[in-house]
Each structure stands twice: as structure tokens, then as C-alpha cells.
Image (cartoon, coloured by chain):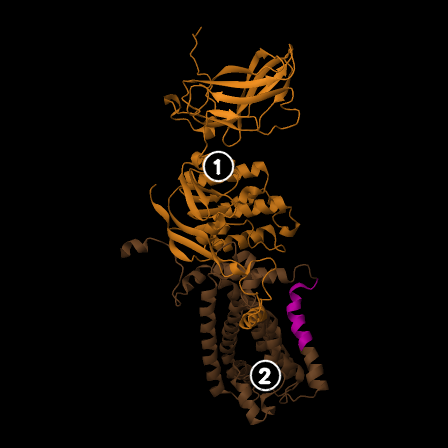
Chain colours: A orange, B brown
Amino acid sequence: MSDTVIKIEGLRKQYRLGTIGGGTLTADLQSWWAKKRGKEDPNTKIGTNCAETGDSFYAIDGIDLEVHKGETIGIIGANGAGKSTLLKLLCRVTAPTEGTIRMKGRIASMLEVGTGFHPELTGRENIYMNGAILGMTKSEIDSKIEEIIDFSECRQFIDTPVKRYSSGMYVKLAFAVAAHLDAEIMIMDEVLAVGDVKFQQKCLGKMENAAAGEGKTVLYVSHNMATIRQLCNRCIVLEHGKIVFDGDVERGIEKYVGLGNVDYKPFYDFSDTKRPSLDHGRTLFVHSLTFENKQQAVYSSLEKMIFSIEYTPNVDDENIGVYFSVVAMDDSPVGTTFSGIIDNSKKGVRTKKTLEFDISNLVDGTYYFYLDVFYTNEFGTFNSCDHPMEKVFFEVGKDASTSQWNKRYFGNIKLPSLKLVGQK
Amino acid sequence: MKQRKAEWDVVITPKRKWYSLNLNEVFRYKDLIILFVKRSFNSQYKQTVLGPMWFVINPLLTTFISTLIFGNIAGIQSDGIPYFLFYLVGYTLWNYFSTCVSTTSTTFTANAGIMGKVYFPRLTMPISSVLFAAINMLVIFAMSIITMIIYMLKGCSIHLTLNILLIPILMFQTAILGLGVGIIISSMTTKYRDLAILVSFGLNLWMYLTPVVYPISDLSPKFRTIILLNPMSAIVQNYKFALLGIGDMEIKYWIVSQLTTIVLFLIGVLTFNRVERTFMDTV
């Protein structure tokens, strides 16, 4: 399990900013001649600052990494963080500027599905072609071709040229080939973005299997956090060509979405906060929210969350209620709580109400909500009057009963426990 | 420490020794080479009515036009060989060479899409181009043999000799020379696209510096030497000699040509080897 299969040391990749020559010999000569005469380079792109050309830029800036056998690593980061460059270096598409990469076993890269597909060839011929490009020998493909065709769900069309395929079929076929590689290390860049949901799930399943069952190592780049969460057991966050986080997937995603450094402030002032519409805040205005008796909005699951809100109604005699939807840090809604009627409005009177929220069902983690205050009638129909657009964060701490809790499978809510009933 | 190093299958470093060619790897991908050849073959004449028949029709047409223009209109000598056969034989290896050069010279630029996405030994691409071109050449070779037999039956004085055994060597040398020149150009076109344009022009010129459409015996001795210093001349001339028995066997120039071939091939492979690692950044 702890066998190192990839070892990266001090990896850097430099790219030159600006134009790399004019692309043609004449253009290069032109630039050289212009420089010689002290004139402006005729090949500089309009708008580029001349001082910038010749500068260099590190797409990968000093990465050290060890990957062990059987790990599935999700690589996330903003555009331009160096994810794809890293994969390109690993796949040997281009060479690093500094540092070394050592790898054990065969590498299958899926930087793009369908590489080497030729539109004129049939599906079957392309399976052989693509397989060979990815490093399989003919006999290996022979032994797997039936499996590949089945996986691709394209059996009916397998002897038709792929130029007649729909884009979905094309991708399915391509992925089927890639997924059946006998490689020890699989490198995938955003390949599941296409294909229908069912097929995506099938592919992820196949990958999970490959990692867990066959001990393959998977490196996966995606902007789709749900697939990262499903597939990966380790997460690397890249920023400006450096690894800024390496470890647990949930924490990594938190870090990436920018919630890793959430400020659990105890007081929110909503007086200048944006509202979703001009109507909001007109009939009632919420001034603030305060988590009571807290320096930080961090709770243990045994505690009750107590907070107060201050508001000023603009109309008389309406029933006021409060509700909010608790959302987990990956933006998936967890649940919604309603207060019932807490007050009867008096025009122009600034009121403060304190509320209690039972969080014992929430599993540890960071959550947020948007506060919403509404008017309601006796039949329960309600009408939102203020909704400050600021995320209110709070954290629920770990407790002993959820130490084994895996959110990916269990969800964010701990349902009431099962009880044994008397048998008749 | 040495033991530990051997554990790794792949070690990627910024610089590679100039002599580390990794030919083992190319050999391991032999199935890929075969498939590339098949792919070119299958895709070339897909959706054509005549299909592979074009392999025969193409050279027939070229030869026919040459017979008409160089033979009948311009009246260039052919050493007493029927024009049609003379040009067919002349074109066999020259055609092979020029196809090799023009197809391998676009290796990087034409396949940047594939090569930017997946790693395989880049040398497999030009090798497969050369092998694919060989099919075409062998077809023309077979056609020349058939034409010879027809002319022999008609009573022309053409004799097959044991010299015919030289032909495989000449074909092989052409392949190596074509590959060498092609990959030198392909390595340079990653940065300078101008060369790609010059290739077809250059090949045209080169053809006239090679005794393809004229017999070497027609030239004055001074010209002869210049022409024969061109590595393709000795090949084409010796091929004509081996097959048709015309002219002389140019042993001296052949050795020069062989040395040139080896040097060009080595330069080609080494520059290719240098360029292939990072060409994606400049192409």
C-alpha cells in the first residue's frame, strides 16, 4: 500500500511570455533586423508591453510530491494553477525545466479522449489505433476488444466509420478504450465532462474499481467537485504552480472553494448588505445577526446555537417569522428550519429577538445560511420581506458518535437513531 | 543507491543525454507503427470508387505524362530503353524518396494535436510514413518488372542479371536517406514554418539534379561529377543499372552516397531526439 509509484522532486516548468519568435524564419530575421537598427519590432503583438517580452513564467513552480500505489488523487485548482501542465509533464508530452519525475509502471494518459481517432476508420479499427497509441500491444487489445465494445455501448455501430458517430458515442468509445488499459498509473484530465450521467457514473465506478480492487493509481483533474469527492481519497490543491494543500478530500475542496479560511465571526451587520431585490428590506429591514455568548460561531454538536436578530418593521400588525436553509460548504443544501411566528410587527420599532437552533443532528463541518425574515398569515402562507445576501457561517465540531462518519456516503444529517421495539 | 535507481521505470529529467535514443521503446511500439501504416492505407482511398487501384493508376499516369513530354516532345535520350520503362524505373526510387521526405517533414506540425495529448515514441510517426510509402514503391517496382517482361516478350533487348540482388539494398538506403532528410526538416519546422513551404520546391529542384528523367551518360564529365555527388543520383543510377543494365555501376559515388546517408540519418535522429521533448511548447 505504501509503495511509492510516483516521486516528483523540485519540479518546475518555465514558459516564455510574449511571442516565441514570429513562427517563421523571416519573422525572426525581421525582428532581429529591427532590433539591430533600434526600431520597434514589427512582430510584437499590438497592446503588449515591450518590457514584458522575454520575461519568463513558471507554470509549475517547485512541486514535490510522492504518490503511493492504489491512491486516487484529485488535483484541483483555479484555471492557470498548473494542473494540466503537471499532467502534461507526467505524461511526457513535454519536458520539465528543472527537477525530476520518477515513475514505476506503465502510464496511461487520458488528457483528451479519442486521441488519434481517425474519422474515416470504423469504431473497431479506431479501438486498435487508440489502444496502440496509449501503449497497448495488438494481442492485449485482441483479448479485450469484446469487453471494450460492451463497455462503450456502441456495439451496433462498431463497424461504422466514427465520422458518422454522435459526439456522445465518440466519447464513450474513446473512454472505453482508455478505461481498459492495463496501466498501473492512470492520468485523467477532465475527461468525464462529456457523456451522459449514466455513463459518467459507469466510468467513475470503473475507475474506483481500478483503484480499490486492482491497486491502480489514479490522478484526476476536474472542476467537478462531486466527482472528485466520489472518486478520490486524496486531494491536492494547486495555486500558481505550487501545492498549497495536500491531504483529505473534504478539507482540500474547502480550501479550493475558499472556505478553508472562513472567518466564523459572531456578529453580522446587514445594514449595507445587498438584497436580492428592491422589495426586500422595504417592509421590514434586518439590521444584524449576533451569535450569543460566542467569540466565534463554532459549536459542539451538543450545544444549542443561540443567536439574535435585530430588525425594524415598516408596517403594523403582521406576523413575523424567520427561516433559513443550512447549506454545506460544497453548496449542497442540508435542510431548512422555520421559526413559526415570533413577533407581531410594530411600525418603526427596532426589535431584537433571540432564537435557538438545535444543531445536534448536523454532522461536523462548516455550514452557512442566508437569513430570511418573512411575514406570514394565519394560514401559513408567507412572504419573504428581507433576505440579506451575506453568507452566515458556523462550524459544528466533531463528536464521538460521528467519528466514523463518511459524508460522501452518509450525508450531512444524523437521523434519529434506530430503536429496538418489543416483539410480539 | 544504484539498486534504488533501477526500481523506477520512467525517469523524467530536464535534459537528456544526446545519445539516449530509446530505440527499445520504439521497438516496443511496433504494433503502433503497423497500425499507423494501416491507418494511412485505409484512410487514403476510403470512399473512392477505384480504391487501392489508385496505387497503380497514379504512377501509370505520371509515367505516361513523362513519356509524352520528356520523351516524345523534348526528345531526351533514354539509353535505348523504351521511354515508358525508362521513366517508370527512374521514378521508382525517386518517388519513394520524395514521398518519404515530404510526409516525414510534417511529422510534428501535422500531428501536434495527437502529440500534445499523449506520449508515444515520436519516431514511430516518421517510421510509419516511410513504411507506408514503401508500399507504393513496391507496387511501382512490380509494375516495372511486369513492363519489362512485356517488352522482353515483344523482343526488346533487356536482360535480367544477378545485379538485381542489389535492389533491396538500394531501396533500404533510399528509405534511410528519406527518413533522415525528412526528420531534419520536421525538427526545424517546429519553429520555422518557412521550411515546410520550401520542401516541395526543393524536392522539385532536387529531382532535376538526379538522373531521373535523363540518362547520366548524356552529361558532360564535369556535370556528371556534380550530379553524382548528390546522394540520390548514385542510388537512382545504380538502380537503373541493376534492373535494366544501362549505364555503369557507380561504385565510388555510391560509397560517398552511403556515407552521406548515414551522416544525414544520424543528424536527423539526434535533432529529432532533441526537439521531440519540448516541441509542444514551440510548435
Magenta-highlighted residues: B49-62
For residue B73, above or below residue A338: below
Residue visible at 63% across and 24% down in the picture = A280
Relative image position of residue A39 (x, y in whole percent): 57, 69
Residue visible at 47% across and 22% down in the picture = A413
Q: CA separation, marks 2 and 1?
A: 69 Å
Determine which of the numbered discs, if any, sits on residue A258 in the image: 1
Label 2 marks a residue whose chain is: B
Identified by mark 1, the residue type is: Gly
Q: Are marks 2 and 1 on the same chain?
A: no
Q: Is residue A180 visible?
A: no
Secondary element type, mark 2: loop
Asked if residue A184 is among those painted magenta in the image, a careful observer would answer no
In front of the other: B283 or B50:
B283
Secondary element type, mark 1: loop
Label 1 marks a residue whose chain is: A
Query: Magenta segment, principal secondary structure?
Result: helix
For residue B249, above or below residue A193: below
The outermost residue toward the bottom is B221
Determine which of the numbered discs, if any, sits on residue B36 in the image: none
Quadrant for the N terminus of chain A in the image: top left
Residue B53 quadrant: bottom right
Residue carrying label 2: B209
Residue visible at 49% across and 37% down in the picture = A257
In front of the other: B96 or A115:
A115
